[in-house]
Image (cartoon, helix red, strand yellow):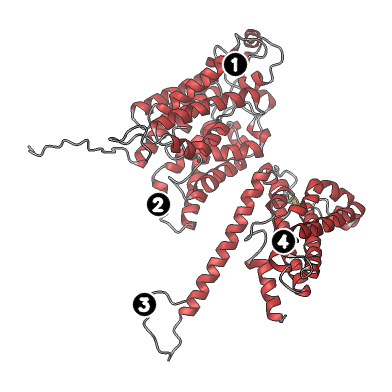
């Protein structure tokens, strides 16, 4: 027995980068399972091929920079980037879309700025936005969910990977697409006449979002990140949606529930904006960061040209994160609130 | 002026002090119109013309105009030569004139031109000034064309489209296509692509310079056999 009295709060970080990345990968599982169940094996094919490409590009970039590639490959961070990007991409993407996306993420988004820990933007979202503005056609053809059609099998997924696009019957507009193009239907009628909407926020989509919510809550329980950014984002999005809902008229922006459980909301809230590098640093800053992302997502979804907006909102607020940090420096112990630093 | 300093001017204009890659002047047209080779060439020729003529006129009047009013005078000269090239293009390359649109008159505000007029032509005799304007224009134009070629290749999967706008109908066949099922990579044609590719060009130039400097340093450090060595401390300049 030691007689040494340890009184100070000695912080100890039990989570290494590698461990955090593994936990994040593990936590995507419920969402990915839901995505695979409703949309077929396309997402899994994306993740496997994308992961291999990402390891290749990471090796290339780290070698070009004259560093030891092994350490960079073993910390799983590039696999997290590629997995997050591949979850966000439409299933059944052709191979060149994956190559361009992963290359943009790893080379443009990460290594040009100095590698892990130095990237001002979320690398996965950089890759996603490059693809979204470069190849709008491929990026907007989502597979139809189970319930509307039978999802394609593995052979279809592989032939889609080689460049054969999905048959028209197998793709469908997402609920957010339909909502954006809604002309003159009350929300009630929209739900009644359009099969895509399902019970709350779209067949398949609601369960995919619930899956990512479960994974995210588990990460929160594991203390991989704090609650501030995700809760603030969901609150900001919900509040904005509540203001724009107007009881469900024909120009309604959709209910908060629709916005929470549709598109990439939960995925973004728990897996994208919680990126420790590109988000705000302090807890107060994260509250502001998350809330603004939620509001911007709502504004772009309802007023902008694109049906979903998580990637754009995250990039815009990544820009703003240093500014947010400057105004939300936590008070150091022993200093007054008003005191100038 | 001796031929050695013409060498310096050439090296400055094309590489060491390149207006686009080092001085980063004239970025607005550089980024906005270089979506294809033909656009880039059109703007390159126009800028080259304006740079040369404005440097020529400025060098001619440099001893007559007083220092306090020199900038307005230079701007008037530049505006006049821009108007001239605009009218010329309107007459002989009307389609290209329409494509370049507002960026043709905007050459007036291109900082390269005023920069060279003020920094070089207003202090140097006629011939070197004309040569400086010409070679700076060539350096700027080469970057424009390289950037245009990369963006056109990435963005559309082809090269030299619509060259007939500049070189007459026979140039229509110059259009070369990589593959008919190439998916156009819109980012390269949009402004962000221009920023990113310009960044890569600047990085490539710096890389080449750094390699060259390293090689020079190694050569300088090599001990000449039989020479005496002196121990020094601190920096010797």
Residue on which disc 4 sits: B68
Q: Label 4 to label 2, Cα distance in Å?
A: 63 Å
Instruction: Specify the subunit that label 4 lies on.
Output: B
Q: Is any part of residue A143 visible from this angle?
A: no
**Sequence order check, earlier mark of 2 and 1:** 2
Nearer the observer, B187 or B72: B72
For disc 1, the neighbor class at 10 Å (few under 14, some 14 to 19, many from 20) is some
The answer to whether residue A190 is left or right of residue A224 is right
Residue on which disc 2 sits: A70
Q: Label 2 to label 1, Cα distance in Å?
A: 50 Å
Residue on which disc 3 sits: B233
Depth-wise, is mark 3 or mark 2 nearer the camera?
A: 3
- Give coordinates of residue B237: x percent, y percent: 47, 76
Q: Could you confirm whether marks 3 and 1 are on the same chain?
A: no
Find residue A126 and report its image quarter. top right
Q: What is the secondary structure assignment of the residue under circle 4?
A: helix
Q: Label 4 to label 3, Cα distance in Å?
A: 48 Å
Q: What is the secondary structure assignment of the residue under circle 1?
A: helix
- Give coordinates of residue A300: x percent, y percent: 61, 27
Instruction: Specify the subunit that label 2 lies on.
Output: A
Mark 4 and mark 3 in contact? Answer it, CB < 8 Å.
no
Q: Could you confirm whether marks 2 and 1 are on the same chain?
A: yes
Find residue A222 and report its image quarter. top left
**Sequence order check, earlier mark of 4 and 3:** 4
């Amino acid at each position: 027995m030691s007689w040494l009295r340890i009184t100070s709060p000695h912080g100890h970080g039990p989570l290494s980068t590698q461990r955090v990345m593994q936990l994040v990968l593990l936590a995507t599982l419920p969402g990915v399972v839901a995505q695979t169940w409703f949309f077929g094996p396309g997402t899994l094919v994306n993740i496997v091929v994308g992961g291999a490409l990402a390891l290749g590009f990471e090796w290339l970039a780290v070698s070009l920079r004259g560093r030891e590639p092994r350490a960079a490959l073993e910390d799983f961070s590039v696999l997290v980037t590629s997995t997050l990007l591949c979850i966000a991409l439409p299933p059944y993407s052709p191979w060149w879309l994956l190559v361009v996306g992963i290359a943009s993420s790893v080379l443009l988004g990460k290594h040009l700025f100095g590698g892990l820990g130095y990237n001002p933007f979320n690398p996965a979202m950089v890759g996603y936005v490059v693809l979204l503005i470069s190849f709008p056609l491929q990026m907007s053809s989502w597979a139809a969910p189970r319930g509307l059609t039978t999802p394609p099998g593995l052979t279809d997924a592989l032939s889609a990977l080689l460049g054969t696009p999905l048959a028209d019957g197998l793709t469908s507009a997402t609920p957010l697409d339909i909502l954006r193009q809604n002309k003159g239907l009350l929300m009630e009628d929209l739900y009644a006449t359009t099969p895509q909407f399902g019970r709350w926020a779209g067949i398949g989509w609601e369960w995919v979002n619930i899956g990512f919510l479960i994974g995210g809550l588990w990460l929160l329980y594991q203390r991989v990140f704090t609650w501030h950014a995700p809760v603030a984002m969901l609150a900001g999005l919900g509040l904005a949606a509540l203001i724009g809902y107007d009881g469900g008229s024909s120009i309604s922006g959709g209910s908060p529930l629709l916005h929470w459980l549709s598109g990439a909301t939960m995925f973004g809230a728990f897996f994208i904006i919680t990126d420790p590098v590109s988000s705000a640093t302090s807890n107060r800053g994260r509250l502001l960061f998350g809330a603004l992302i939620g509001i911007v997502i709502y504004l772009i979804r309802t007023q902008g040209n694109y049906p979903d907006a998580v990637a754009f909102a995250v990039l815009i607020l990544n820009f703003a994160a240093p500014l947010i940090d400057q105004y939300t420096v936590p008070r150091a112990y022993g200093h007054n609130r008003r005191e100038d630093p | 002026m001796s031929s050695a300093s013409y060498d310096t001017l050439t090296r400055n204009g094309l590489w060491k002090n390149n207006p686009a890659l080092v001085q980063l002047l004239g970025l607005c047209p550089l980024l906005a119109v270089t979506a294809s080779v033909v656009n880039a060439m059109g703007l390159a020729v126009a800028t080259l013309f304006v740079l040369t003529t404005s440097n020529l006129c400025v060098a001619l009047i440099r001893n007559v105009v007083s220092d306090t009013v020199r900038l307005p005078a230079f701007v008037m000269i530049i505006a006049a030569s821009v108007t001239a090239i605009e009218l010329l293009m309107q007459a002989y390359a009307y389609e290209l004139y329409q494509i370049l649109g507002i960026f043709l008159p905007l050459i007036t505000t291109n900082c390269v031109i005023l920069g060279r007029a003020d920094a070089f032509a207003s202090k140097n005799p006629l011939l070197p000034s004309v040569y400086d304007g010409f070679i700076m224009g060539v350096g700027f134009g080469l970057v424009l064309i390289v950037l245009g070629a990369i963006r056109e290749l990435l963005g559309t999967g082809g090269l030299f489209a619509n060259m007939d706008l500049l070189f007459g109908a026979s140039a229509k066949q110059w259009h070369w296509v990589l593959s008919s099922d190439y998916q156009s990579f819109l980012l390269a044609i949009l402004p962000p692509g221009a920023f990113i590719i310009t960044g890569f060009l600047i990085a490539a130039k710096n890389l080449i310079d750094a390699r060259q400097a390293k090689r020079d340093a190694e050569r300088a450090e090599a001990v000449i056999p039989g020479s005496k060595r002196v121990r020094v401390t601190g920096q010797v300049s």
